[in-house]
Image (spheres, grey):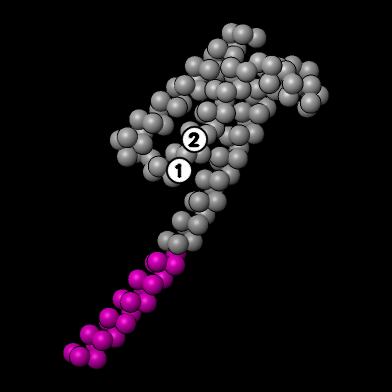
Amino acid sequence: MDRLLNVTTGISLLLLLIVLISVRRAHIRVEYSVAWLAAAAAMLALSRMRTVLDALRGLLGLPDTPLTLFLLAGTVFLVVFFRFSVILSHLRDDNVALAQRVAILELRLRGLEAHEG
């Protein structure tokens, strides 16, 4: 059990480091990195607080503490993925609206050019 928690701690620290480096190099925007940083911090905190995990295990009625950790981690990451799906959906809708505006402007420009010419 302790070995698994140590591995989870290492993975959490690695994720934190990767996200911070990505922000520094401008590979990911700061507002999107917050969700990843929060998820990695939650994983790190849970992997270091065995008593909290044991209490959550009892509360959730799960048979095993590592199962509790990975169930909570999976839930956190599913929430992060859902958040990014919503963001991508909004971006796609914005791109469609922008393409429509550009098409309307091009049509008007052609109309003006035809009218002048």
Taking the image as shown, residue 15 lies to the left or right of residue 114, namely: right
Kindly identify the residue that appears in the image at 56 percent across and 40 percent down: 80
Q: Secondary structure at mark 2?
A: helix
Determine whether label 2 and label 1 are within 8 Å by CB: yes
Spatial CA distance of label 2 from label 1 is 7 Å
Q: Which residues are magenta?
A: 96-117
Q: Is residue 52 magenta?
A: no
Q: Secondary structure at mark 1?
A: helix
According to the picture, the residue beneath numbered tag 1 turns out to be 32
Q: Main secondary structure of the magenta part?
A: helix
Q: Position of residue 58 (x, y in %)?
A: 79, 21
Q: In the image, is residue 23 above or below residue 63? A: below
The quarter of the image holding the C terminus is: bottom left
Identify which amino acid the numbered label 1 is placed on: Tyr
Graded by Cα atoms within 10 Å as few (under 14), some (14 to 19) or many (20 or more), the crowding at tag 2 reads many
Kindly identify the residue that appears in the image at 52 percent across and 45 percent down: 84
The quarter of the image holding the N terminus is: top right
Q: Is residue 98 magenta?
A: yes
Tell me which corner region of the image, top left, top right, bottom left or bottom right, holds residue 94.
Answer: bottom left
Which of 68 and 103 lies nearest the eye of the viewer? 68
What number of labels is visible?
A: 2
Graded by Cα atoms within 10 Å as few (under 14), some (14 to 19) or many (20 or more), the crowding at tag 1 reads some
Q: Position of residue 33 (x, y in %)?
A: 44, 39
Of the numbered discs in the image, which one, if any, rests on residue 36?
Answer: 2
Q: Residue furthest right?
A: 61
